[in-house]
Image (tube, helix red, strand yellow):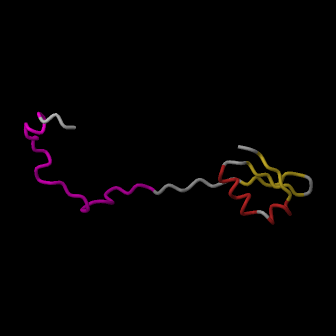
Amino acid sequence: MSAKYVTLADANGHLAELMEAARRGDEIFIEAGNHTQVKLVAVAPVRQARVLGAYRGKLHMRADFNAPLPDDFWLSGQP
């Protein structure tokens, strides 16, 4: 991560490149009037909230799901 200081005029002409650098983790400072005025930072993606019951009725299990496995399954030696 590196810090870059650019003037307002340079930032105006190269905003797309500065945004990509900020997404990579670089710190971008924009100066105006010989003072640092703005720090450009990337925004973290918004996580969607989990919804209880979102898959209700879409997943099904076989009727024999809890039935014991046959002995030949356990004794076959195959993973």
Q: Residue at x 70, y 58 (%)?
A: 19
Q: Residue at x 11, y 41 (%)?
A: 69
Residue 5 on the magenta segment: no
- Horizontal side of residue 41 vs 11, given as left or right: left
- Horizontal side of residue 6 vs 63, given as left or right: right
Overall secondary structure of the magenta stretch? loop
How many marks the image carries: the answer is 0
Segment tinted magenta in the rendering: 49-75
Question: How far across and how far down the image is residue 31, in percent?
Answer: 85, 55
Viewer-proximal residue among 74 and 32 = 74
Question: How far across and how far down the image is residue 58, in percent?
Answer: 26, 62
Viewer-proximal residue among 33 and 8 = 8
Q: Quadrant of residue 10?
A: bottom right
Q: Residue at x 14, y 48 (%)?
A: 65
The quadrant in which the C terminus is found is top left
Q: Quadrant of residue 2?
A: top right
Question: How far across and how far down the image is residue 67, in percent?
Answer: 10, 44
Q: Residue at x 70, y 43 (%)?
A: 1
Q: Residue furthest right?
A: 34
Q: Residue furthest bottom?
A: 13
Viewer-proximal residue among 61 and 79 = 79
Question: How far across and how far down the image is residue 14, in percent?
Answer: 78, 63
